[in-house]
């Protein structure tokens, strides 16, 4: 069982920046594929970014060039640096951990990000 706790959400004006953090409870954090997803009411959860154990990164099309995902294996922490935020980035952001892309994932409780225009 892996517990994930997100933090860093809040209210920011369009064009601003936020950094989200996700703290993981597992001692084998470095082995997990970690990811950020987001969801708005009435819509499906959307990929923001993933980073594999080997450091391969994938971004959703809507955030490429603006968001940066990173992991600190020593601190068992996943980060998401969000720059040039837009109102359409408003969502609940969830941290995700899985050992492979085919296995079930653990999810955090989410953190709200609101971008005002």
Image (spheres, rainbow, N blue to C red):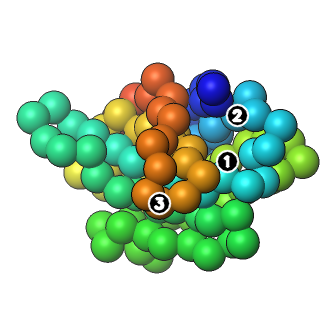
Position of 41 with respect to 107 (left or right) is left
Measured Cα–Cα span from mark 2 to mark 3: 18 Å
Q: Earlier in the sequence, mark 1 or mark 3?
A: 1
Mark 1 to mark 2 CA distance (whole Å): 8 Å
Relative placement, left or right, of 114 versus 30 is left
Q: Nearer the viewer, residue 91 or 96?
A: 96
Give the mark, 2 or 3, whose residue is nearer the N terminus. Answer: 2
Label 1 close to label 2 by CB (< 8 Å): yes
Q: Is residue 21 visible?
A: yes
Q: Would you name the residue on which mark 3 appears?
A: 101
Secondary structure found at label 1: strand
Q: How far apart, in angstroms, are the residues tagged by discs 1 and 3?
A: 17 Å
**Residue depicted at x 60% and y 52%:** 99
* Residue drawn where x is 85% and y is 42% of the image: 75
Quadrant for the N terminus, please: top right
Read off the residue under disc 1.
78
Residue 3 picture location, percent across and down: 63, 25
- Using residue 73 as the reference point, say whether residue 80 is left or right of it: left
């Amino acid at each position: 069982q892996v517990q994930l706790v997100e933090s860093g959400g809040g209210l920011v004006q369009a064009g601003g920046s936020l950094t989200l953090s996700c703290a993981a409870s597992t001692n084998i954090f470095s082995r997990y594929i970690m990811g950020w997803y987001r969801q708005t009411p009435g819509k499906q959860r959307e990929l923001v970014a993933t980073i594999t154990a080997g450091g391969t990164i994938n971004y959703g099309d809507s955030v490429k060039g603006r968001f940066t995902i990173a992991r600190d294996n020593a601190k068992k922490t996943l980060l998401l640096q969000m720059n040039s935020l837009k109102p359409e980035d408003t969502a609940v952001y969830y941290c995700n951990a899985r050992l492979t892309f085919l296995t079930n994932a653990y999810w955090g409780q989410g953190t709200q990000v609101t971008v005002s225009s």
